[in-house]
Image: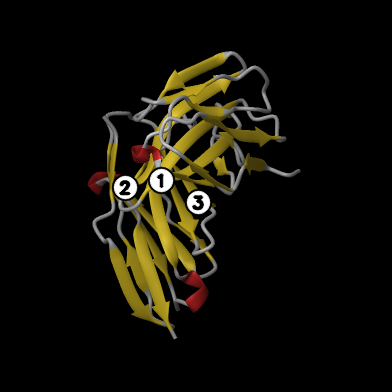
Amino acid sequence: AQKVTQAQTEISVVEKEDVTLDCVYETRDTTYYLFWYKQPPSGELVFLIRRNSFDEQNEISGRYSWNFQKSTSSFNFTITASQVVDSAVYFCALSEWGGSEKLVFGKGTKLTVNP
Amino acid sequence: NAGVTQTPKFQVLKTGQSMTLQCAQDMNHEYMSWYRQDPGMGLRLIHYSVGAGITDQGEVPNGYNVSRSTTEDFPLRLLSAAPSQTSVYFCASSLLGASGGQGTDTQYFGPGTRLTVL
């Protein structure tokens, strides 16, 4: 069975600090997708990134970066120079290849960025 | 494109009442899903569909029914509401892409319906 663990329930940082959100997953599939979603206080779910299991290249998008390590089954998310607008709940999720209709979510990490 | 739309945004029911949560998408996505979000639980899959006329159960299907008569619509029915069904419900859709191309195999979510059952 697939499982996603986000061990950090809540994180609080001061603006401009860097912060890393951890995600560890379990799956028996050899090919799969990993995702990060952001849920701001307004409640909607915003897609951030999808990573294919066969592509371990790290990705950077502005202040966001993702570190995928298949050897440790981790897909961590780092925000550099955090801003108050980054305050949200962040979810890591997993799906089987070609099975995007069945996402398995972690319980989320609530990030608070204080001014 | 309007994306994924859900109605209503808020709903209060009494125990035993029935209702239908509406979900529609205009992106011609094959896949559609329903999730519920409870505090501290993340999102859990209720039902999903891989195309019109095809539905299946997710992790927490009890108390819910779905049908998919068109590609665009995927309503979720609560047959007899219970307080345990108080939750935020999200509908999502995705486009099948066997090669994993950009924009495919990624679920996009509607704004959610906040349901309270008294």
Question: Rounded to the nearest whole Å, what is the CA distance between mark 2 and mark 1?
Answer: 7 Å
Q: Which residue is mark 2?
A: B41
Residue B21 occupies which quadrant of the picture? top right
What chain letter is assigned to the residue under label 3? A
The three-letter code of the residue at mark 3 reads Ile
Residue closer to the observer: A12 or B70: B70
Q: Which residue is mark 1?
A: B37
The residue at the far bottom in this view is A115
The three-letter code of the residue at mark 1 reads Gln
Question: Rounded to the nearest whole Å, what is the CA distance between mark 3 and mark 2?
Answer: 21 Å
The three-letter code of the residue at mark 2 reads Met
Residue closer to the observer: B12 or B56: B12
Identify the element where label 2 is drawn. loop
Q: What is the quadrant of the C terminus of chain B in the image?
A: top left
- Residue A47 in percent (x, y) is at 53, 51
Q: Which residue is mark 3?
A: A49
